[in-house]
Amino acid sequence: MYCLQARSNFARLFSGINMKESAIDQVLKGHVPEHVAIIMDGNGRWAKIRGLPRIAGHKEGINSVREITKVCGEIGVKHLTLYTFSTENWKRPSSEVSALMHLLLKTIKEEIKELHRKGVKFTIIGDLDTIPSKTANGLRDGIELTKTNAGLNLNLALNYGSRQEIVEAMKIIAHQVKSGAVLPEKIDIELLNNSLLTNNMPDPELLIRTSGEHRLSNFLLWQIAYTEIFMTDLFWPEFREDQLLDSILDFQSRERRFGNIKEMIQG
Protein backbone atom coordinates (compact mmCIF):
# COMPACT_ATOMS: atom_id res chain seq x y z
CA MET A 1 0.00 0.00 0.00
CA TYR A 2 2.81 2.40 0.90
CA CYS A 3 4.64 1.68 -2.38
CA LEU A 4 1.48 2.23 -4.41
CA GLN A 5 0.80 5.52 -2.63
CA ALA A 6 4.42 6.64 -3.06
CA ARG A 7 4.34 5.77 -6.76
CA SER A 8 1.06 7.65 -7.12
CA ASN A 9 2.52 10.75 -5.45
CA PHE A 10 5.65 10.44 -7.59
CA ALA A 11 3.54 10.24 -10.75
CA ARG A 12 1.49 13.25 -9.76
CA LEU A 13 4.68 15.19 -9.02
CA PHE A 14 6.18 14.48 -12.41
CA SER A 15 2.86 15.07 -14.13
CA GLY A 16 2.75 18.53 -12.55
CA ILE A 17 6.35 19.28 -13.60
CA ASN A 18 5.70 18.17 -17.17
CA MET A 19 2.55 20.28 -17.38
CA LYS A 20 4.46 23.31 -16.09
CA GLU A 21 7.33 22.79 -18.52
CA SER A 22 4.84 22.32 -21.34
CA ALA A 23 3.10 25.62 -20.53
CA ILE A 24 6.40 27.51 -20.39
CA ASP A 25 7.59 25.86 -23.61
CA GLN A 26 4.31 26.82 -25.25
CA VAL A 27 4.66 30.44 -24.13
CA LEU A 28 8.25 30.62 -25.37
CA LYS A 29 7.17 29.44 -28.83
CA GLY A 30 5.07 32.57 -29.24
CA HIS A 31 5.59 36.29 -28.77
CA VAL A 32 6.27 37.02 -25.10
CA PRO A 33 4.86 40.47 -24.23
CA GLU A 34 7.65 42.95 -23.62
CA HIS A 35 5.62 44.84 -21.02
CA VAL A 36 3.02 43.25 -18.73
CA ALA A 37 0.95 45.45 -16.40
CA ILE A 38 -1.17 44.04 -13.58
CA ILE A 39 -3.95 45.51 -11.45
CA MET A 40 -3.47 43.40 -8.32
CA ASP A 41 -6.98 43.34 -6.88
CA GLY A 42 -8.81 41.24 -4.30
CA ASN A 43 -6.39 40.94 -1.38
CA GLY A 44 -8.96 42.15 1.14
CA ARG A 45 -11.76 39.93 -0.17
CA TRP A 46 -9.42 36.92 -0.23
CA ALA A 47 -8.77 37.52 3.48
CA LYS A 48 -12.40 38.25 4.37
CA ILE A 49 -13.80 34.97 3.03
CA ARG A 50 -11.20 33.18 5.17
CA GLY A 51 -12.09 35.12 8.29
CA LEU A 52 -8.72 36.91 8.30
CA PRO A 53 -7.85 40.60 8.66
CA ARG A 54 -7.37 42.47 5.39
CA ILE A 55 -3.64 42.86 5.96
CA ALA A 56 -3.33 39.05 5.80
CA GLY A 57 -4.53 39.25 2.20
CA HIS A 58 -1.89 41.86 1.40
CA LYS A 59 0.79 39.67 2.96
CA GLU A 60 -0.31 36.66 0.91
CA GLY A 61 -0.41 38.88 -2.16
CA ILE A 62 3.34 39.44 -1.76
CA ASN A 63 3.87 35.74 -2.44
CA SER A 64 2.08 36.23 -5.75
CA VAL A 65 4.27 39.25 -6.53
CA ARG A 66 7.40 37.21 -5.82
CA GLU A 67 6.30 34.30 -8.02
CA ILE A 68 5.03 36.43 -10.92
CA THR A 69 8.23 38.50 -10.89
CA LYS A 70 10.32 35.33 -11.00
CA VAL A 71 8.40 33.82 -13.91
CA CYS A 72 8.39 37.08 -15.90
CA GLY A 73 12.17 37.21 -15.59
CA GLU A 74 12.49 33.59 -16.70
CA ILE A 75 10.35 33.89 -19.83
CA GLY A 76 11.83 37.16 -21.03
CA VAL A 77 9.32 39.86 -20.08
CA LYS A 78 11.27 43.12 -20.04
CA HIS A 79 8.94 45.30 -17.95
CA LEU A 80 6.45 44.29 -15.24
CA THR A 81 4.33 47.14 -13.88
CA LEU A 82 2.30 46.37 -10.75
CA TYR A 83 -0.48 48.69 -9.56
CA THR A 84 0.54 48.74 -5.92
CA PHE A 85 -1.18 51.76 -4.37
CA SER A 86 -3.33 54.33 -6.15
CA THR A 87 -3.85 57.97 -5.28
CA GLU A 88 -7.42 56.98 -4.39
CA ASN A 89 -6.26 54.33 -1.89
CA TRP A 90 -5.60 57.06 0.69
CA LYS A 91 -9.38 56.99 1.26
CA ARG A 92 -9.03 53.62 2.99
CA PRO A 93 -8.96 53.44 6.82
CA SER A 94 -5.77 55.04 8.14
CA SER A 95 -4.90 51.86 10.04
CA GLU A 96 -4.89 49.86 6.79
CA VAL A 97 -2.88 52.50 4.92
CA SER A 98 -0.32 52.58 7.73
CA ALA A 99 -0.06 48.78 7.74
CA LEU A 100 0.37 48.76 3.95
CA MET A 101 3.20 51.28 4.08
CA HIS A 102 4.94 49.29 6.81
CA LEU A 103 4.49 46.07 4.83
CA LEU A 104 5.85 47.71 1.69
CA LEU A 105 8.98 48.88 3.49
CA LYS A 106 9.48 45.51 5.18
CA THR A 107 9.08 43.67 1.88
CA ILE A 108 11.49 45.81 -0.11
CA LYS A 109 14.13 45.48 2.61
CA GLU A 110 13.75 41.69 2.59
CA GLU A 111 13.58 41.23 -1.19
CA ILE A 112 15.81 43.88 -2.76
CA LYS A 113 19.15 42.07 -2.37
CA GLU A 114 17.78 38.96 -4.05
CA LEU A 115 16.23 41.05 -6.82
CA HIS A 116 19.58 42.78 -7.28
CA ARG A 117 21.40 39.43 -7.40
CA LYS A 118 19.07 38.33 -10.21
CA GLY A 119 19.71 41.51 -12.19
CA VAL A 120 16.24 42.99 -11.65
CA LYS A 121 15.96 46.75 -12.03
CA PHE A 122 13.54 48.21 -9.48
CA THR A 123 11.67 51.40 -10.37
CA ILE A 124 8.67 53.43 -9.22
CA ILE A 125 6.10 55.54 -11.04
CA GLY A 126 4.09 57.80 -8.77
CA ASP A 127 4.63 60.42 -6.10
CA LEU A 128 7.07 59.28 -3.41
CA ASP A 129 7.16 62.73 -1.80
CA THR A 130 3.77 62.34 -0.11
CA ILE A 131 4.14 58.86 1.36
CA PRO A 132 5.75 58.25 4.79
CA SER A 133 9.42 59.27 4.59
CA LYS A 134 10.73 56.02 6.05
CA THR A 135 8.96 53.99 3.36
CA ALA A 136 9.94 56.44 0.62
CA ASN A 137 13.60 56.34 1.64
CA GLY A 138 13.60 52.53 1.67
CA LEU A 139 12.15 52.49 -1.83
CA ARG A 140 14.68 55.05 -3.07
CA ASP A 141 17.49 52.89 -1.66
CA GLY A 142 16.17 49.96 -3.70
CA ILE A 143 16.01 52.09 -6.84
CA GLU A 144 19.58 53.29 -6.31
CA LEU A 145 20.94 49.79 -5.65
CA THR A 146 19.48 48.30 -8.83
CA LYS A 147 19.59 51.26 -11.23
CA THR A 148 22.28 49.78 -13.51
CA ASN A 149 20.77 46.28 -13.70
CA ALA A 150 19.80 45.10 -17.17
CA GLY A 151 17.32 42.34 -16.35
CA LEU A 152 13.59 42.55 -15.77
CA ASN A 153 12.35 46.03 -14.85
CA LEU A 154 10.05 45.57 -11.84
CA ASN A 155 8.08 48.81 -11.86
CA LEU A 156 5.68 49.63 -9.01
CA ALA A 157 2.88 52.12 -9.62
CA LEU A 158 2.80 53.62 -6.14
CA ASN A 159 0.74 56.60 -5.04
CA TYR A 160 -0.09 56.71 -8.74
CA GLY A 161 -3.07 57.96 -10.71
CA SER A 162 -3.15 58.11 -14.49
CA ARG A 163 -5.26 61.26 -14.77
CA GLN A 164 -2.83 63.15 -12.55
CA GLU A 165 0.09 61.75 -14.54
CA ILE A 166 -1.43 63.17 -17.74
CA VAL A 167 -2.09 66.52 -16.05
CA GLU A 168 1.55 66.72 -14.92
CA ALA A 169 2.71 65.82 -18.44
CA MET A 170 0.60 68.64 -19.87
CA LYS A 171 2.14 71.06 -17.37
CA ILE A 172 5.62 70.04 -18.57
CA ILE A 173 4.59 70.67 -22.17
CA ALA A 174 2.91 73.98 -21.26
CA HIS A 175 6.15 75.21 -19.67
CA GLN A 176 8.07 74.17 -22.80
CA VAL A 177 5.64 76.13 -24.97
CA LYS A 178 5.79 79.15 -22.67
CA SER A 179 9.60 79.17 -22.78
CA GLY A 180 9.61 78.88 -26.55
CA ALA A 181 11.28 75.46 -26.51
CA VAL A 182 8.25 73.86 -28.20
CA LEU A 183 5.85 75.37 -30.73
CA PRO A 184 2.15 74.56 -30.10
CA GLU A 185 1.81 72.98 -33.55
CA LYS A 186 4.68 70.62 -32.68
CA ILE A 187 2.78 69.03 -29.79
CA ASP A 188 2.16 65.41 -30.78
CA ILE A 189 1.77 61.90 -29.37
CA GLU A 190 5.51 61.38 -29.09
CA LEU A 191 5.98 64.58 -27.07
CA LEU A 192 3.26 63.55 -24.63
CA ASN A 193 4.70 60.03 -24.40
CA ASN A 194 8.07 61.50 -23.51
CA SER A 195 6.49 63.65 -20.79
CA LEU A 196 4.85 60.73 -18.96
CA LEU A 197 6.33 58.76 -16.06
CA THR A 198 6.62 55.72 -18.35
CA ASN A 199 8.74 57.56 -20.94
CA ASN A 200 11.57 55.02 -20.67
CA MET A 201 9.48 51.92 -21.38
CA PRO A 202 7.15 50.69 -24.13
CA ASP A 203 3.39 50.67 -23.66
CA PRO A 204 2.05 47.49 -22.05
CA GLU A 205 1.14 44.75 -24.49
CA LEU A 206 -0.85 42.84 -21.86
CA LEU A 207 -2.89 44.17 -18.94
CA ILE A 208 -4.12 41.68 -16.34
CA ARG A 209 -6.76 42.44 -13.72
CA THR A 210 -7.66 40.03 -10.95
CA SER A 211 -10.75 39.65 -8.71
CA GLY A 212 -13.46 39.79 -11.38
CA GLU A 213 -13.70 43.57 -11.59
CA HIS A 214 -14.06 45.03 -15.10
CA ARG A 215 -12.60 48.52 -14.85
CA LEU A 216 -9.24 50.26 -15.27
CA SER A 217 -9.24 52.17 -11.96
CA ASN A 218 -7.23 55.15 -13.25
CA PHE A 219 -4.28 52.96 -14.29
CA LEU A 220 -2.11 53.76 -17.35
CA LEU A 221 -5.08 55.21 -19.25
CA TRP A 222 -2.96 56.78 -22.00
CA GLN A 223 -0.53 53.87 -22.30
CA ILE A 224 -3.08 51.06 -22.77
CA ALA A 225 -4.70 52.41 -25.96
CA TYR A 226 -3.87 49.16 -27.81
CA THR A 227 -3.14 46.88 -24.88
CA GLU A 228 -4.75 43.43 -24.75
CA ILE A 229 -6.76 43.02 -21.52
CA PHE A 230 -7.10 39.78 -19.58
CA MET A 231 -9.51 39.65 -16.63
CA THR A 232 -9.86 36.80 -14.17
CA ASP A 233 -12.22 36.14 -11.26
CA LEU A 234 -9.31 34.94 -9.12
CA PHE A 235 -8.19 37.16 -6.27
CA TRP A 236 -4.61 38.40 -6.47
CA PRO A 237 -3.27 36.02 -3.76
CA GLU A 238 -4.55 33.13 -5.92
CA PHE A 239 -2.84 34.35 -9.10
CA ARG A 240 0.42 32.47 -9.56
CA GLU A 241 2.65 30.98 -12.25
CA ASP A 242 0.02 28.80 -13.95
CA GLN A 243 -2.42 31.69 -14.18
CA LEU A 244 0.22 34.04 -15.59
CA LEU A 245 1.19 31.51 -18.26
CA ASP A 246 -2.49 30.99 -19.12
CA SER A 247 -2.98 34.74 -19.55
CA ILE A 248 0.05 35.00 -21.86
CA LEU A 249 -1.13 32.02 -23.92
CA ASP A 250 -4.50 33.76 -24.23
CA PHE A 251 -2.68 36.93 -25.33
CA GLN A 252 -0.72 34.97 -27.92
CA SER A 253 -3.94 33.54 -29.38
CA ARG A 254 -5.30 37.00 -30.17
CA GLU A 255 -4.91 38.90 -33.42
CA ARG A 256 -3.62 42.40 -32.72
CA ARG A 257 -4.77 44.66 -35.56
CA PHE A 258 -4.00 48.19 -34.29
CA GLY A 259 -6.85 49.54 -36.44
CA ASN A 260 -5.95 47.50 -39.53
CA ILE A 261 -8.06 44.77 -41.09
CA LYS A 262 -7.07 41.12 -41.04
CA GLU A 263 -6.00 41.03 -44.69
CA MET A 264 -3.61 43.97 -44.21
CA ILE A 265 -1.90 42.25 -41.26
CA GLN A 266 -1.46 39.02 -43.20
CA GLY A 267 -0.04 40.94 -46.13
Image (cartoon, helix red, strand yellow):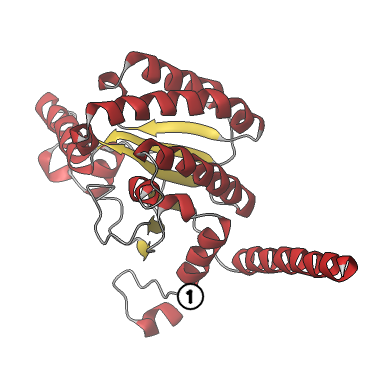
Q: Which residue is drawn at 48% across and 18% down?
A: 141
* Residue for badge 1: 253
Is any atom of residue 183 visible in this view?
yes
Q: Indicate the quadrant where residue 206 lies.
A: bottom left
Image quarter in which the N terminus is found: bottom right
- Looking at the rendered structure, the kind of residue marked 1 is Ser
157 vs 32, nearest the viewer: 157
Tell me where residue 69 appears, x and y as whole percent: 54, 45
The single residue placed furthest to the bottom in the displayed view is 263
Tell me where residue 214 appears, x and y as whole percent: 26, 62
Image quarter in which the C terminus is found: bottom left
Disc 1 residue crowd, few under 14, some 14–19, many 20+, Cα 10 Å: few
Q: Is residue 222 above or below residue 93?
A: below
- Is 182 situated left or right of 251 in this image? left
Mark 1: secondary structure = loop
Total numbered labels placed on residues in the image:
1
Tell me where residue 149 appears, x and y as whole percent: 58, 31
The single residue placed furthest to the right in the displayed view is 3
Q: Is residue 128 above or below residue 123?
A: above
Is any atom of residue 32 visible in this view?
no
- Is 183 situated left or right of 84 in this image? left
Q: Which residue is drawn at 38% across and 85% down?
A: 263
Tell me where residue 58 appears, x and y as whole percent: 41, 39
